[in-house]
Amino acid sequence: MEEKQQTKPNPRDVGPRKALGSLHQRIKEARVLMVGAGGIGCELLKNLVLTGFGEIHIVDLDTIDLSNLNRQFLFGMQHIKKSKAMVAKETAGKFNPNVKLHAHHANIKDAEFNIKWYKGFNLVFNALDNLDARRHVNKMCLAADVPLVESGTTGFNGQVQVIKKGVTECYDCTPKPVPKSFPVCTIRSTPSQPIHCIVWAKSYLFTEIFGTSEDDSPEFDHTKDAENAQEIEALRRESQELKKIREQIGTDSFARSIFEKVFTRDIQRLCGMEDMWKRRKAPTALDYDTVETAAKGIPGHTANMDQKIWSLEENFVVFVDSLQRLSKRVQELHAEDGDKSILSFDKDDVDTLDFVAAAANLRSHVFGIELKSKFDIKQMAGNIIPAIATTNAITAGVCVLQAFKVLRQDLSSAQMVFLSRSSERVFSTEKLSAPNLSCDVCGVARATVEVDLSRATLDDLIEGYLKKGLGYGDEISILTDQLLYDPDFDDNVGNEFTSMGVEEGTFITVMDDNEEEGENGEILQPRVNLVLAVVNKEIEEDQDPIVPPEEGMVIPRKVKQVEAAPAPQEAHGAAAGAGMKRMHEDMADSNCGAKKRKLDDATAELSIKDGRRGKGKMEVVEVDDSGVIEID
Ligand SMILES: Nc1ncnc2c1ncn2[C@@H]1O[C@H](COP(=O)(O)OP(=O)(O)OP(=O)(O)O)[C@@H](O)[C@H]1O
Ligand SMILES: [Zn+2]
């Protein structure tokens, strides 16, 4: 009787166990990481907890905003300003007390989340909203050889992709387009890319001055434009101030008033919000008189130079000039049909484009962001797509279904899943593609290198580890996020790693440019890029400060690709109908980074039991016998 009671199943386990059979035990033992506790993350965490995943680590750098509450259901009003990761843990923990939850209020790029830490997980889930963090986690999962379930949503579209080192394509196997739509908080308060400033100039500033007020604009997603009650109030005051200034239209002081409001006072107010700039670079306000003085003598026709990247002063001149042109037009319209006429942005209307280009660049300057030419800005002006709770919920569900396949070690049945309202079927799936052999991220050899960072120099790496240990020749380049060495740049050779910013967890890439002869006099292909993850290790003084490569470690050579006729257009296969193609294009947006790579890429024989792989291919690819590059 007593024994029976001990084996009585936990009521929380009954449903999942019935549905999942033997997989349930594996799920209970699984240790998983979820990066991002926002729109997808909240839904995903709820699913993971209710399914009974044994241990879940949550990483999110952000705090909860009022604007998150419409779709991030683990959070309530009482949680505003609190850590997303912590509150997500607290709320979801109550759904299933058997699950161990760990919250990390931190940036996933922080050094504490190193390869060793990643290796402790059976599976990683990305629930992120930006390319940079997605790329980072992709790289770390490849380095640690942990499978990754990548996901993203944009409006009604969603996408889930399983990534496994050496078996499937990685996140970076397909080049990613520049995102087209952005959260309003990014646009109004924390821009970090030129496009953020372009959207601000077009959909906020232009509309406030010459169009309907932002409140009436159908293009703006108001569910997301405020960080909290205080911030809503501040943004509202900003808009009201602009409305007042709008009444000065046509006066001599109009340009100065607008400029001083948006590039001086509003920026000073933002700078005062210290919390916002703890992890970002704070903006610098502009002074009208200083810029005006410096801009004296700049010709009025600057705006015609549409391929040139204008200087701060040139942008100022175009800003003032286009503002005058537009003001004149509005006044003429008002004279004709009363006070109601407005202007709309049109990329082909040169006055509106000039204004948006100059205003966007001035804002970029303020935030230390790269300036763009008018020509580029014309291409980049895009639309804003709102986040939809249901899309996030469905996508998070698909993530878990794909995770089951990974845990069953049945990657051949894992799929790339697309969710779309525009296609005939809500779900479309495609087989996972094999790695892209020329991918700079996964088409590389990876290893960890133990270095005594207190004394190792670049020379120790070049002479000891690479040349002596691995047989590299002289023609090599070494990079981190900056160039450390190449045959024409040897300034750093005697420098210690630490003086070049190399620390625990830094990835060092070694590129081989040698043209060596093989045993039979044939010219060998250079080695694939070697990515070394640095691990700090104290090494006895009488020994080399870098542990030499393991015996037998060989860096494979690049495969030779032979140019041939282009592959047929319809290489996407039956699943990718017209609706799907449209969706692929839409997926360029911020939340959805994963994109399908065309089957005509050079992946031919690295098949993962995909019957369609290679169909319609016209390329000849030489692949190593092993197919997959592995060093461990
Ligand atoms: N480098 C990073 N490290 C940790 N968490 C990150 C990182 N980059 C983004 N995130 C988190 O990923 C989550 C993505 O969620 P989501 O797309 O719903 O965005 P959001 O910031 O919650 O909403 P919105 O920006 O649309 O108002 C956010 O909570 C964000 O803080
Ligand atoms: Zn790749």
Image (tube, helix red, strand yellow):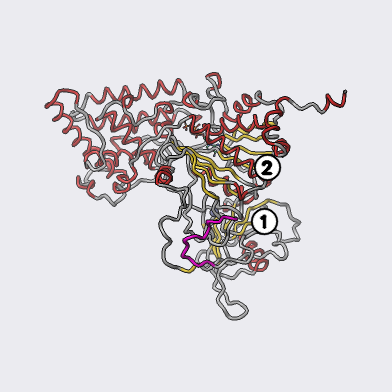
* Quadrant in the rendering for residue 328: top left
Q: Is 576 left or right of 556, judged from the image as shown? A: left
Q: Residue furthest top?
A: 78
Residue at the spot 43% in from the left edge and 23% down from the top edge: 231
- Can you give x and y, in whole percent of width and height, for residue 472 in the image? 61, 68
Q: Which mark is residue 121?
A: 2
First of labels 1, 2 by sequence position: 2
User: Is residue 130 visible from the viewing direction of this image?
Assistant: no
Q: Amino acid at mark 1?
A: Val
The image quadrant where one finds the N terminus is: top right
Q: Amino acid at mark 2?
A: Phe
Q: From this view, report whether residue 62 is shown above or below residue 475.
A: above
Q: Of discs 1 and 2, which sits in the foreground?
A: 2
**What secondary structure prevails in the magenta region?**
loop
Label 2's element?
loop
- Can you give x and y, in whole percent of width and height, for residue 68 in the image? 49, 27
Q: Residue furthest bottom?
A: 520
Say if the magenta span includes residue 142.
no
Q: Is 289 left or right of 41, judged from the image as shown? A: left
Label 1's element?
strand
User: Gap between marks 1 and 2, in whole Å?
Assistant: 21 Å
Q: Nearer the viewer, residue 147 or 567?
A: 567
Q: Nearer the viewer, residue 13 or 184?
A: 13
The image quadrant where one finds the C terminus is: bottom right
What span is colored magenta in the figure?
609-621
Q: What residue is disc 1 on?
A: 449
- Can you give x and y, in whole percent of width and height, for residue 333 in the image? 15, 29
Residue at the spot 79% in from the left edge and 26% down from the top edge: 8
